[in-house]
Image (tube, rainbow, N blue to C red):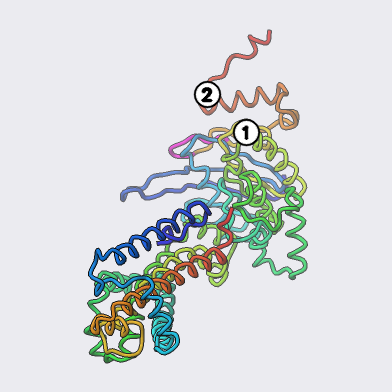
């Protein structure tokens, strides 16, 4: 591994609830290489979203080390972008202008902005919907616009906070493939938070399993290439069952059934 | 307020017209069969006759002009001040903490309680009337504008931070459009309040050319047809304001359309 793109060391975060501190993240250690796709799974309340907010720089109140290229994170930056579970498009802007809003601080010329916005709408398959308002788009299409907005600055880090969680099952499967293709195409380092274990196995190079209250790393698992390539491969099934077991979900003993 | 409007669909519109026609029929019948004292209820034809007289030899057009002028100047001043103060209250937390409670308290005062004070400060002529109309327009505009700017969802604020918006980008792209529907509600309310206050100011303050003056004249001289005509004109102008406000809002807040 070269210089880590992202390094978390003994990262802890507490909130104050009714005057008493409540620890939501405890001693998180994680090193991410450039271009890596990390998926983080865990039950609700394990601090997954909080972790992304810290990496994004929205919340600077934590203990421990949080470094990008060896530099501590001081706030949001153009090198990191996020896709939330809800698309969070501005309803009064067209798809095109929503994407362009991310370029306000990019320093690009008007023509370059127009071109890169068009490229990214094409990349998510919405080139024909540039002039549509969010209310005119389906949930899946809106989320694609949000993905285009997150990518338009060509960020080095793409933070994904359950971006497909609110979509129907078919749209979700389709967008998982697109997400994988797009992230590889942009050569971004991606960190995806999800509670869908299948999604974590299918998209991640490595899976970080979190246990809740306080959120802490239970295990970091490498995903074999075969598992990542095919949702029906034995490697995929084995790894999914392993992660589910880590999360306390029992699966049938497949070895015996298969024999 | 915005929910009460003229029906858009044809069958409903027809039903509304029929019920209105029925009222006029009963009215004509009541006069025809002498069911009411004709000194207190003119027939629709007498009102039309009065309208014809006013248009050819009377002053009604000048009165409408004078009333609209007061109304629009007062509304402009009040709504302008309301927009400015409301935006400041919604965007500047510290300012809202200091000034906000006073604005809320001012809102609780009944509108007409201001009449004697404003008459003392500004006199009973146009200055006093316009001041009262401005106070009336100010109240709904300041409150709704303030709420509109203050109630920008947390998710939008967070997004602005993640996209590194500058303050002016935040106002232009997030806060102002998010507040726009509330601002329109306020302006719409302001228009209606200002119209009420216009009638009130012309009735309670010095008699001057204007529709309110014609109301007083009608009741004092027992010109019952003039009284009815003036009330109808008030209603029609109010109705016109209402639909104008609604049309403008649909035109400007076009992203709300599915």
The local crowd at label 2, few if under 14, some if 14 to 19, many if 20 or more residues have their Cα within 10 Å, is few
Location of residue B200 (image quadrant) = bottom left
* Left or right side of A130 for B163: left
Q: Which mark is residue A253?
A: none
**Depth order, front residue of A14/B18:** B18
Looking at the image, residue B151 lies above or below residue A14: below
Per the model, the C-alpha gap separating discs 1 and 2 is 21 Å
Q: Is residue A210 magenta?
A: yes
- Which quadrant holds the N terminus of chain B? bottom left
Looking at the image, residue A205 lies above or below residue B162: above
Residue B34 place in picture, x, y as percent: 26, 66
The residue located at (64%, 37%) in the rendering is: A172
**Highlighted magenta segment, given as a residue range:** A209-215
The residue located at (43%, 71%) in the rendering is: B187
The local crowd at label 1, few if under 14, some if 14 to 19, many if 20 or more residues have their Cα within 10 Å, is few
Residue A82 place in picture, x, y as percent: 61, 52
- Between disc 1 and disc 2, the foreground one is 1
Residue A181 place in picture, x, y as percent: 75, 42
Say yes or no: labels 1 and 2 on the same chain: yes
Q: Earlier in the sequence, mark 1 or mark 2?
A: 1
Chain letter, disc 2 residue:
A
Q: Which mark is residue A169?
A: 1
* Left or right side of A150 for B37: left
The residue located at (28%, 71%) in the rendering is: B41
Location of residue B241 (image quadrant) = bottom left
């Amino acid at each position: 591994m070269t210089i880590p793109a992202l390094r978390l060391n003994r990262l802890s975060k507490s909130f104050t609830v009714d005057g008493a501190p409540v620890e939501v993240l405890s001693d998180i250690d994680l090193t991410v290489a450039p271009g890596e796709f990390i998926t983080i799974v865990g039950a609700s309340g394990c601090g997954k979203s909080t972790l992304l907010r810290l990496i994004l720089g929205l919340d600077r109140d934590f203990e421990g080390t949080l470094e990008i290229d060896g530099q501590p994170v001081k706030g949001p930056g153009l090198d990191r972008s996020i896709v939330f579970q809800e698309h969070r498009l501005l309803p009064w802007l067209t798809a095109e202008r929503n994407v362009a809003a991310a370029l306000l601080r990019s320093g690009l010329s008007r023509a370059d902005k127009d071109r890169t916005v068009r490229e990214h709408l094409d990349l998510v398959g919405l080139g024909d919907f540039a002039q549509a308002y969010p209310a005119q788009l389906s949930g899946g299409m809106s989320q694609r616009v949000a993905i285009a907005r997150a990518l338009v600055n060509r960020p080095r880090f793409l933070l994904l906070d359950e971006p497909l969680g609110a979509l129907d099952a078919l749209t979700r499967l389709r967008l998982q493939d697109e997400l994988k293709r797009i992230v590889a195409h942009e050569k971004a380092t991606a960190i995806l938070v999800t509670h869908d274990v299948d999604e974590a196995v299918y998209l991640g190079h490595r899976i970080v399993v979190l246990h809740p209250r306080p959120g802490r790393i239970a295990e970091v698992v490498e995903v074999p290439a075969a598992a990542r390539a095919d949702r029906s491969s034995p490697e995929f099934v084995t790894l999914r069952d392993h992660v589910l077991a880590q999360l306390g979900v029992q699966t049938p003993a497949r070895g015996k059934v298969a024999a | 307020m915005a929910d009460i409007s003229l029906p858009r669909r044809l069958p409903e519109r027809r039903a509304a017209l029929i019920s209105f026609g029925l009222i006029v029929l009963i009215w004509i019948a009541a006069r025809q069969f002498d069911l009411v004292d004709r000194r207190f209820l003119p027939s629709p034809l007498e009102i039309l006759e009065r309208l014809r007289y006013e248009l050819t030899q009377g002053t009604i057009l000048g009165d409408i002009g004078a009333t609209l002028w007061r109304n629009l100047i007062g509304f402009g001043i009040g709504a302008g001040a309301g927009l400015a103060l409301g935006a400041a209250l919604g965007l500047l937390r510290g300012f809202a903490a200091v000034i906000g409670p006073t604005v809320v308290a001012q809102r609780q005062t009944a509108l007409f309680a201001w009449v004697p004070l404003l008459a003392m400060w500004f006199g009973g002529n146009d200055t006093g009337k316009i001041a009262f109309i401005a106070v009336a327009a100010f109240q709904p505009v300041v409150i709704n504008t303030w709420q509109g700017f203050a109630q920008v969802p947390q998710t939008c604020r967070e997004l602005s931070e993640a996209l590194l918006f500058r303050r002016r980008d935040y106002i232009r792209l997030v806060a102002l459009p998010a507040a726009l529907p509330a601002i329109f509600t306020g302006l719409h309310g302001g228009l209606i309040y200002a119209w009420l206050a216009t009638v009130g100011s012309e009735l309670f303050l010095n008699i001057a050319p204007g529709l309110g003056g014609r109301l007083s004249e009608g009741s004092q001289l027992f010109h019952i047809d003039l009284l009815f005509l003036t009330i109808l004109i008030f209603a029609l102008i109010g109705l016109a304001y209402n639909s104008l406000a609604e049309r403008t809002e649909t035109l400007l807040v076009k992203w709300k359309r599915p």
